[in-house]
Structures are given as C-alpha cells and as structure tokens.
C-alpha cells in the first residue's frame, strides 16, 4: 500500500535496522523499544490487521514464514532460552497504531505476568 509506513520499510524506501528476513516477512528493530529486545515482524504483503487473515490455505505460507521468523529472531537476539513475549495489537482498543499487521517480539528482561 503506497502510504503505509511498514510497506515502505519492507520496500527499503524508509530505513530500518533489519535483523532477519525470509520470503514472507521482514524483522526490524522497533524505533521506540520498550524492552532490551523489541523486534517487529512485518509480513511483506500488506494486511491491515490480524483479522485480514482468515486461517485458510492462503494464509499457510505467511504463517509458516512468521513461525520461522519467531524462531530465528529469538535465537539471534539471545532470548531463545530466557524467554520472550509475542504481541499482536489489533484496532483502537488493542493499541494498534500502524495499520499493517505486525508481531512484537519482546524480551531481554523479565516482563512479568501482567498482560496490561
Ligand atoms: P502498534 O502500536 O502495535 O501498531 O506498533 C507499532 C510499532 O511500530 C510501535 O512500537 C512503534 O514504535 C513502531 N514504529 C513506528 N514507526 C517505526 C519505524 N519507522 N521503524 C521502526 N519501528 C517503528
């Protein structure tokens, strides 16, 4: 999508620190990290939010790509053993500020049991 900041990052039109990439996703460092490890996993295709995926066959390649990214980013960032949190915000109440589906991978410190 032409006016989407994450589409522009995926296309290399806006700079970002890439930590991992596969055929489905790009993983970048969040510009305003809330934990020592704060990586965003961005699908290369534009989906406005998680509800744009219907769980059908068409999503299988993307979800496999996301899964590969989670494993590789966790390993590369050194949180594979210590643990991490994976978050998807959706819509206004969910706190989503960028309308391009993305997964936050957070770690590097104890995040605690409270979700909000
Ligand atoms: P959300 O609030 O779930 O939509 O998350 C959007 C995230 O994108 C926030 O954590 C922002 O700090 C991050 N963000 C926004 N612009 C950029 C950018 N240009 N590069 C890296 N991260 C960004």
Image (tube, grey):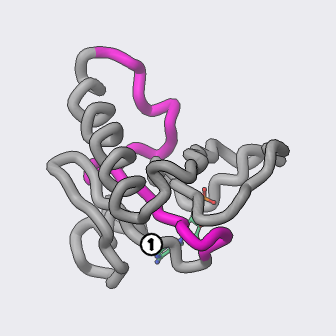
Q: Quadrant of ligand 1?
A: bottom right
Quarter of the figure that contains the N terminus: bottom left
Residue drawn at x 24%, y 23% as measured from the top left:
58
Residue 67: x, y in percent? Answer: 34, 37
Q: Is residue 86 left or right of residue 29?
A: right
Residue 75 vs residue 38, the one in the foreground? 75
Residue 103: x, y in percent? Answer: 49, 49
Image quadrant assignment for residue 10: bottom left
| Stretch in magenta | 33-56
Residue found farthest to the bottom: 15
Residue 55: x, y in percent? Answer: 39, 18
For label 1, the residue is: 29
Count of numbered marks: 1
Residue 106: x, y in percent? Answer: 58, 58
Residue drawn at x 67%, y 70% as measured from the top left:
34
Ligand 1 closer than 8 Å to label 1 CB: yes
Q: Is residue 40 left or right of residue 75?
A: right
Q: Is residue 56 above or below residue 35?
A: above
Image quadrant assignment for residue 3: bottom left
User: Is residue 49 highlighted in magenta?
Assistant: yes
Residue found farthest to the left: 23
Residue 11 vs residue 30, the one in the foreground? 30
User: Is residue 55 highlighted in magenta?
Assistant: yes
Q: Is residue 23 left or right of residue 9?
A: left
Residue drawn at x 50%, y 42% as measured from the top left:
49
Q: Secondary structure at mark 1?
A: strand
């Amino acid at each position: 999508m032409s006016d989407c900041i994450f589409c522009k990052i995926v296309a290399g039109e806006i700079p970002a620190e890439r930590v991992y990439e596969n055929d489905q996703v790009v993983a970048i460092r969040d510009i305003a990290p809330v934990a020592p490890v704060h990586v965003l996993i961005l699908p290369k295709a534009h989906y406005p939010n998680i509800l744009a995926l219907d769980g059908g066959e068409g999503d299988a390649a993307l979800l496999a790509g996301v899964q590969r990214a989670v494993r590789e980013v966790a390993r590369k960032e050194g949180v594979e053993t210590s643990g991490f949190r994976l978050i998807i915000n959706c819509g206004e109440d969910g706190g989503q500020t960028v309308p391009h589906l993305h997964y936050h991978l957070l770690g590097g410190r104890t995040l605690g049991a409270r979700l909000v």
